[in-house]
Image (spheres, coloured by chain):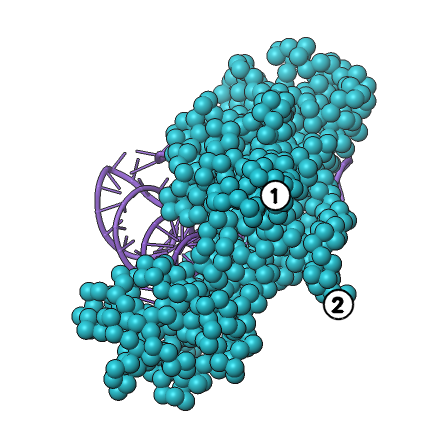
RNA sequence: GGGCGAAUAGCUCAGCUGGUUAGAGCGCCUGUCUUACACACAGGAUGUCGGGGGUUCGAAUCCCUCUUCGCCCACCA
């Protein structure tokens, strides 16, 4: 915006279907109610009310931390406008044959009572058991084959056992029957490539209704799919499962049933062995319940066709993903994409815009419509709407278009701002959201929805755990805002996170965690206070009118440093949009916010405050033309520093900028122009750089010889004639900054006792006589040496003590720098200390 | 199991295409309440840049390998 572009940031939120429904159901449960008691309409009303009451919190937080969004355009996926986009997208995809109804095994959450997409069922590494169960042959019960399974309870739904057709061990059994234990039911031995001879026993039981792969095998071999686990995860005879769930197992929870069945197999001598097994178990990403594979009818999107352009968009450089490491992850997902289950069996969400007609024959009996239907458009018979709702991410995926007015392709916002420029988000929703926005963008708009995807890091606690509500290890940003201000929060996070890197914060020590930003914001404020106090509110000469000949060395220096800072900040951010596609260099550069923050901080603190402000103090207090020059330069430089910093710390900078002398009422830093470096500066500030180096050298000498702070000392600067004439003008400054009376000389005084060589052939000479008490200094050094001798002797004695050779974990030994986790001996530690002391001595 | 990434000061991390003496914040040590700021100022200490090998005039940076962490994906029951 400050660079003069017309910009827009649309704030908003999604309706978070499953998560919100869960919360409201929990509230109902507390009142002793279930959603069924209210009915669909009442439940949706109540949820809408809940969202209305609580949904503003996030937006309020965004405002509090200074998100400069256009709040008049605040969007919501469940609003009438965005819902219209959802219908449009659905119908278009349906008409193209990209949305279809599928009968297959999907991920089912028995707690949320809905299906989930592959992405919503998160694998968690779990230590489970692999049970080996023997199934006897029907012909010859003395022989048996052994299957391996992690979920014995599903055996009630077994319809076959499969072996690999190439597996010599079992070739003779193919086509024969085995007896399913417990149920005493004959099932065939089939040959299928799916069975891996190398895993377990090489025999796999086939349960089509409760395993996605088994379902495919069952389909290939035309087997039935008996359902033995119901929607609640409870054992029950479902479709095609008559007589498959014995009375004592019926109504048991799936995990209780597992224990029961294992026990029974054991007693019947059918459990060959049980081994520890590491595998990934899928959990519901909203409630963490173990997901149950379940046979059901769901709506899917055929993804392969949508993935093509999205993949090409990234490969061609139309869209860049930062940090770069996620590009490979994105491409892998896109190239191995699977169809997306978009229907959910909940009530909070966009109802699938499909109506069914009982009178018409397929395909006319299934009608996708933009408008609500009451009667069939083909035969006028009454129709009923599908009861499922759409995955929230279906509507979120349309966000960059729907918030700008799509499907109205002539919408002003859509024409002005699509494609957008930068999407900032967390890497964990790269597939959920980002990938789908890109696919929809290409599908419906023919172009990527944005040019840059910036995937930021994660806030973690001191143990490296992700901050989360359930763990209670999070930091409420509002607490930080209240304690130190939004700018402190912003600066700490922006400066502290490298591209895509996580940030570690201590929730129990906010003071320490946010010291960086708090200190910086305070410093900035204090510089402003100094300026307002010393420059005052009187008229200030326009900087543009100040001639180069009027500037001092310090002025030239700070202006040169400002130029450098502006250039470096611009480089850190890089171009905001590509020319068509990103060039190879641009593809991985830019958006280095931490480099931007560090550059601005260094300029303001280490250059402006530490040197220029100090060098200017005397000038500001001395009436005359130079006072006016100093005022003009100081205001100019600080004004530009505020502009540079505004995107990072908007509140402090805006408050100060509004108070600067010459501020025009009604103008805002937020919309002020971005600074640019001077094209051709006449002076690079080298003169003041020399002064600075002399001051630094003097300070080192003063500190080294412990010269009392108040005491003024004499020094000689040996320099060329040219340097003498120029630098001598800075004598007063040197006296102030280094508390040293400097005499510029052409040769070394004979009394010089120490020298400090400076760059550029200038030599600093300080006569030490009278500055230190030589006798006292010698005594101090001797005492220090004696102390070292003593320590050494003590150590040598202990080195020879065998008792110290015991091994100890390094972390236990305090006060020594040893790598964590490494084992060492106390003797090693002592030797290291010994060597250190020898070096010192 | 496949893929990707990281390892740099006590801690958390920068270090862009290999090039003077490897940086920052916090912490630590020594001084200082110097009239903008003690949330500050001045000065200081601390690194075999994970181990080993290689390429190069030159490596924290490029290559190989080992070790240790982390992330993503995955139908091995």
Identify the residue shown where x is 74% and y is 65%.
A33
**Residue matched to label 2:** A32
Which residue is nearer to you in this view: A308 or A523? A308
Side of A660 where A557 appears, left or right:
left
Residue A358 position in % (x across, y down) = 56, 48
Quadrant in which the C terminus of chain A is drawn: bottom left
Q: Relative to A416, say whether A182 is above or below.
A: below
Residue A372 position in % (x across, y down) = 64, 39
Under circle 1, the secondary element is: loop
Which residue is nearer to you in this view: A345 or A509? A345
Mark in the foreground, 2 or 1:
1
Q: Which chain is cyan?
A: A
Q: Relative to A468, say whether A130 is above or below.
A: below
Work out whether mark 2 precedes mark 1 in sequence or the reverse, and give the earlier one. 2
Residue A182 position in % (x across, y down) = 41, 82
Which colour represents chain B?
purple
Identify the residue shown where x is 50% and y is 64%.
A292
Which residue is nearer to you in this view: A793 or B13? B13
Give me the disc on residue A381: 1
């Amino acid at each position: 915006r400050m660079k003069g572009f017309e910009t827009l940031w649309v704030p908003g939120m999604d309706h978070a279907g499953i998560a919100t429904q869960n919360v409201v159901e929990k509230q109902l449960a507390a009142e002793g109610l279930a959603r069924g008691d209210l009915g669909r309409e009442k439940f949706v009303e109540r949820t809408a009310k809940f969202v209305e009451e609580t949904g503003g919190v996030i937006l309020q937080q965004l405002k509090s931390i200074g998100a400069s969004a256009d709040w008049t355009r605040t969007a919501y996926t469940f609003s009438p406008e965005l819902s219209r986009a959802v219908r449009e997208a659905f119908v278009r995809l349906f008409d193209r044959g990209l949305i279809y109804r599928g009968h297959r095994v999907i991920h089912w959450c028995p707690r949320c009572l809905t299906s989930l997409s592959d992405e919503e069922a998160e694998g968690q590494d779990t230590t489970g058991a692999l049970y080996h169960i023997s199934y006897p042959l029907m012909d010859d019960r003395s022989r048996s084959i052994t299957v391996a399974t992690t979920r014995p309870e599903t055996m009630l739904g077994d319809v076959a056992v499969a072996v690999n057709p190439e597996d010599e061990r079992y070739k003779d059994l193919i086509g024969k029957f085995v007896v399913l234990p417990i149920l005493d039911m004959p099932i065939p031995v089939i040959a299928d490539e799916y069975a891996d001879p190398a895993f377990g026993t090489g025999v796999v039981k086939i349960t089509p209704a409760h395993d996605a792969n088994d379902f495919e095998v069952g389909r290939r071999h035309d087997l039935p799919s008996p359902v033995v686990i119901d929607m609640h995860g409870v054992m029950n005879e479902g479709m095609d499962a008559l007589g498959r769930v014995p009375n004592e197992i019926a109504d048991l929870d799936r995990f209780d049933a597992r224990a029961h069945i294992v026990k029974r197999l054991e007693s019947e001598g059918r459990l060959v062995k049980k081994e520890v097994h590491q595998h990934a178990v899928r959990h519901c990403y909203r409630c963490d319940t173990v997901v149950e594979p379940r046979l059901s009818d769901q709506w899917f999107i055929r993804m392969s066709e949508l993935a093509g352009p999205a993949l090409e968009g990234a490969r061609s450089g139309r869209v860049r993903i930062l940090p770069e490491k996620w590009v490979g992850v994105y491409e892998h997902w896109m190239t191995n994409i699977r169809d997306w289950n978009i229907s959910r069996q909940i009530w909070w969400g966009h109802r699938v815009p499909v109506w069914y007609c009982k009178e018409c024959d397929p395909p006319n009996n299934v009608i996708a419509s933009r408008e609500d239907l009451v009667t069939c458009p083909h035969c006028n018979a009454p129709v009923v709407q599908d009861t499922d709702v759409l995955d929230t991410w279906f509507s979120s995926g349309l966000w960059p278009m729907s918030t700008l007015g799509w499907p109205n392709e002539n919408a002003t916002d859509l024409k002005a701002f699509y494609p957008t420029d930068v999407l900032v988000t967390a890497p964990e929703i790269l597939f959920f959201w980002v990938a789908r926005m890109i696919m929809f963008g290409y599908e419906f708009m023919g172009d990527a929805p944005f040019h840059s995807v910036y995937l930021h890091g994660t806030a973690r606690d001191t143990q490296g755990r992700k901050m989360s509500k359930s763990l209670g290890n999070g930091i409420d940003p509002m607490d930080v805002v209240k304690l130190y201000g939004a700018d402190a929060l912003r600066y700490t996070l922006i400066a502290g996170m490298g591209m895509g890197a996580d940030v570690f914060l201590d929730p129990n020590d906010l003071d320490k965690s946010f010291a960086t930003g708090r200190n910086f914001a305070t410093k900035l404020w204090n510089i402003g206070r100094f300026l307002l106090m010393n420059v005052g509110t009187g008229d200030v000469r326009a900087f543009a009118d100040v001639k180069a000949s009027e500037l001092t060395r310090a002025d030239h220096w700070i202006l040169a440093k400002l130029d450098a800072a502006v250039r470096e900040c611009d480089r850190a951010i890089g171009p905001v949009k590509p020319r068509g596609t990103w060039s190879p260099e641009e593809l991985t550069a830019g958006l280095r916010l931490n480099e931007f923050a560090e550059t601005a901080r260094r300029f303001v603190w280490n250059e402006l405050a530490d040197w220029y402000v100090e060098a200017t103090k005397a000038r500001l207090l001395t009436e005359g033309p130079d006072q006016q020059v100093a005022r003009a330069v100081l205001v100019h430089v600080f004004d530009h520093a505020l502009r540079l910093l505004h995107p990072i710390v908007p509140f402090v900078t805006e408050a100060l900028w509004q108070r600067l002398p010459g501020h025009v009422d009604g103008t805002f830093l937020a919309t002020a122009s971005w600074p640019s470096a001077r094209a051709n500066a006449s002076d690079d500030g080298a003169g003041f750089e020399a002064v600075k180096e002399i001051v630094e050298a003097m300070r080192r000498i003063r500190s080294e010889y412990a010269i009392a702070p108040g005491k003024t000392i004499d020094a000689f600067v040996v320099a060329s004639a040219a340097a003498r004439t120029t630098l001598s003008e800075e004598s007063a400054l040197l006296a102030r900054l280094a508390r040293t009376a400097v005499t510029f000389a052409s040769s070394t005084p004979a009394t010089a006792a120490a020298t400090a060589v400076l760059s550029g052939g200038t030599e600093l000479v300080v006569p030490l006589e009278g500055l230190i008490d030589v006798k006292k200094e010698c005594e101090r050094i001797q005492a220090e040496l004696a102390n070292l001798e003593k320590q050494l002797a003590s150590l040598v004695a202990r080195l020879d003590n065998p008792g110290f050779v015991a091994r100890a974990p390094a972390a236990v030994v305090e006060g020594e720098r040893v790598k964590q986790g490494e084992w060492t001996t106390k003797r090693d530690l002592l030797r290291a200390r010994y060597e250190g002391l020898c070096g010192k001595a």
